[in-house]
Structures are given as structure tokens and as C-alpha cells.
Image (tube, rainbow, N blue to C red):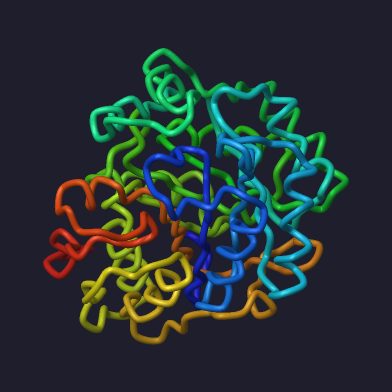
């Protein structure tokens, strides 16, 4: 079983690299917009912010450390969030390019994908008739013949390059095999326990969002790592809240507690990322779990500034929600969560 987890920690990824500017006018693109979104999320309750950068001219993903330097000081001056920088960047980038922000800026936390994989975004093409920038359509269309590359050599390169930075890695696992890759690097002593395992469900090319998939991922991690890891979940798109609800119920049941009344469906569409972050604590719905609202109180063992230990992690990548708006026709930004939590109240965990 994963290590005991007491407090609920909210993380917000404010722009990512999947979505394009034509999909929503609320996608943060410029350094000022990214900083504003991150600060808003922190004020609303996020303790960790996961950062990508965008070219301010056309919104395309970039790993230029100078652009990160334009928004990170503003964020740190305004709030005390834990900074989590991507080493994933975008599938179109080289490993050397993707590494640069974490290598040069030495964040408390950096994400690290545990394997090469298909990363299909092409299904988004049918939802949009026009694109603002020339790069958007080929970026999405080309994903049906594009591999996100993170070989064993690549992963070792990132870990060894950042070894002196005291950066802790968020181990991103998009499929079961990625857990075994993490175990491999634990055996090689290139990562140290407790591992911070981020399980990602519902990306085209990775594990699905079915409840059995969530259970299988958790059981496998328990078997491989015992109590030497901390578990978090991310569900792509409309799966996010349902996946988070399942993980919360499972953690409560395993800890000997009982869900109070389950997550509460949203009553309205929140307008920005900060409002979404504020909505999460009330939806956790687990007796005895506090919503952690300050990075100063977060603990991750081995971190150079904050220790991130002992939490249930809701990873709020809030730009996964375009399908909801396309289907309902309701206006609003991509930072909103759907009303419907499919079956969240009817989950029954056994054993």
C-alpha cells in the first residue's frame, strides 16, 4: 500500500502543451497570462503549480528557459506555491530541448514521463473548423504518426543531469509498463524513495479511464513499491473528477475511513483556473482530510525548499474540457469542469 496520506493537495497546470490557442480564448499564452493564472490558482487553494511555457507570438509550446524566467519570478513574488516544471515539453521537441528549464532553473519538482508512447491529439481536429495560427492544425494532425520519445537512455539522462539540483521528480505513468520502468530506475538508484507516482488515465495511447484501469494501476504500484511511494491521479478531460473521486474513495476505504457523501457535482461553470482550484476542496468529500491551501505546509521528502510527503494529489490540468463545451454549447473557458460526475456516487469499493 502507498504511504499514509493525510492532506489533500491541489495542483494546477495552467497551460500545458496539448491544447492550442484556437480552442479557447482563456488559454494562457504570454508570460503575464501564465503568471496571472498561476497566482489565481494559488490564491484559490493550489499548493503546487505545474508549468509549461508558450511562444507569446503564436501560443506554440516552447521550452525556452528565458520565457520561464519571465513568469516564474512574478509567481514566486506573489505566492508560495511549489514550482513543478515540465521535462515533457511537447512531443515535437528533442530530449535536450525538453530538459533545459529543469536543468537551468532547478525547480523543487519536475515532471518525468516514464516511457515512449503514442500521444494522439488528432481527434480534436473534428471539433474546430478554423485555427488562428498555421502551426495548430499540423501539430494536432501529425500526432497520429508521432511518438513521444522517452527511452531508458533519455530518462537516465534527465535524472543524471538534474542529480545535483535537489529536484524531486513527479513520476508520470501513462500505462502499467511505466510503473515497471519506475521500479527499474529505483533499482538503479537513479530515483530515491518515496516515489511520487502520477497516474495518468485517458490519453489516447495510454491506459484508459475505466475503474478497473484505476484499480489495476494502484494494485500494481502497491505491489512494486509497497509503502515507498505516494499516489496521485490525473484524468484527461471529463474523466478528471470521476478519476479523482475514485482515488479519494479508495484511499479513504484503505485507510479505514468512509466517504462522507462523495464529491459534489458542480452547480455552475467556473470562469477561470483559480475558481476551479477553489472548487476542488469542497469536492474531496472525505472525512478527516483537510484541503491543504499553502505550499509551506506541503511536504515532499528530499525537496530543497518544500517537502512533498503524505498527500492525496488532485492534478487539475484544467485545459482538458473542450468536449464539454462543444457538446453543450455553453459559453465559458476551458478551465471549467463538467457538471456530470459519471457514477461518482454509486461507486462501491470492495475488500
Quadrant of the rendered image containing residue 181:
top right
Residue 288, by quadrant, is: bottom left
Furthest residue to the top? 145
Quadrant including the C terminus: bottom left
Left or right position of 90 against 328: right
**Residue sitting at 44 percent across and 55 percent down?**
26
Number of on-image labels: 0
Is 159 placed above or below 138 here? below
Question: Which quadrant of the figure contains the N terminus?
Answer: bottom left
Residue 284 in percent (x, y) is at 35, 75
Pick whichever, 233 or 78, lies toward us.
Answer: 78
Q: Which residue is drawn at 59% across and 64% down?
A: 38
Residue in the foreground of this view, choosing between 75 and 102: 75
Residue 110 located left or right of residue 302? left
For the point 26% across and 78% down, which residue is it? 259
In front here: 218 or 137?
137
Query: For this rendering, which residue is in front, 322 or 298?
Result: 322
Q: Residue 333's x, y, as percent?
A: 36, 58
Q: Quadrant of residue 111?
A: top right
Q: In this view, does 137 lie above or below 175?
A: above
Give how far across and how far down residue 164 sits, in percent.
88, 46
Image coordinates for residue 48, horizontal then vertical, percent: 60, 65
Q: What residue appears at the point 71 percent right and 75 percent down from the top-left corner?
A: 78
Q: Is residue 46 left or right of residue 257?
A: right
Amino acid at each position: 500500500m502507498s504511504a499514509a496520506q493525510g492532506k489533500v493537495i491541489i495542483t494546477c497546470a495552467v497551460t500545458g502543451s496539448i491544447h492550442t490557442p484556437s480552442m479557447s480564448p482563456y488559454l494562457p499564452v504570454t508570460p503575464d497570462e501564465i503568471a496571472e493564472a498561476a497566482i489565481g490558482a494559488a490564491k484559490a487553494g493550489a499548493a503546487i503549480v505545474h508549468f509549461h511555457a508558450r511562444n507569446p507570438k503564436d501560443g506554440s509550446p516552447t521550452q525556452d528557459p528565458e520565457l520561464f524566467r519571465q513568469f516564474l519570478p512574478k509567481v514566486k513574488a506573489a505566492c508560495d506555491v511549489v514550482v513543478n516544471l515540465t521535462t515533457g515539453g511537447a512531443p515535437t521537441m528533442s530530449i535536450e530541448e525538453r530538459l533545459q528549464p529543469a536543468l537551468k532553473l532547478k525547480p523543487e519538482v519536475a515532471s518525468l514521463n516514464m516511457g515512449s508512447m503514442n500521444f494522439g491529439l488528432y481527434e480534436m481536429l473534428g471539433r474546430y473548423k478554423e485555427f488562428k495560427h498555421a502551426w495548430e492544425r499540423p501539430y494536432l494532425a501529425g500526432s497520429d504518426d508521432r511518438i513521444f520519445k522517452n527511452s531508458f537512455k533519455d530518462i537516465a539522462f534527465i535524472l543524471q543531469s538534474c542529480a545535483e539540483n535537489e529536484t524531486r521528480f513527479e513520476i508520470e505513468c501513462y500505462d502499467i509498463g511505466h510503473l515497471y520502468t519506475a521500479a527499474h530506475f529505483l533499482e538503479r538508484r537513479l530515483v530515491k524513495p518515496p516515489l511520487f507516482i502520477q497516474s495518468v488515465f485517458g490519453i489516447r495511447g495510454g491506459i484508459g479511464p475505466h475503474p478497473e484501469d484505476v484499480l489495476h494501476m494502484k494494485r500494481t504500484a502497491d505491489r512494486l513499491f509497497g509503502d515507498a511511494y505516494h499516489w496521485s491521479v490525473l484524468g484527461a478531460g471529463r474523466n478528471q473528477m470521476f478519476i479523482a473521486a475514485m482515488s479519494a474513495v479508495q484511499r479513504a476505504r484503505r485507510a479505514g475511513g468512509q466517504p462522507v457523501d462523495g464529491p459534489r457535482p458542480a452547480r455552475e461553470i467556473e470562469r477561470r483556473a483559480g475558481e476551479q482550484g477553489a472548487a476542488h476542496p469542497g469536492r474531496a468529500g472525505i472525512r478527516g482530510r483537510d484541503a491543504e491551501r499553502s505550499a509551506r505546509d506541503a511536504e515532499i521528502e528530499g525537496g530543497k525548499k518544500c517537502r512533498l510527503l503524505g498527500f492525496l494529489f488532485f492534478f487539475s490540468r484544467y485545459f482538458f474540457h473542450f468536449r464539454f463545451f462543444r457538446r453543450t454549447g455553453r459559453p465559458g473557458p476551458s478551465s471549467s469542469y463538467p457538471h456530470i460526475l459519471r457514477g461518482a456516487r454509486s461507486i462501491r469499493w470492495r475488500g
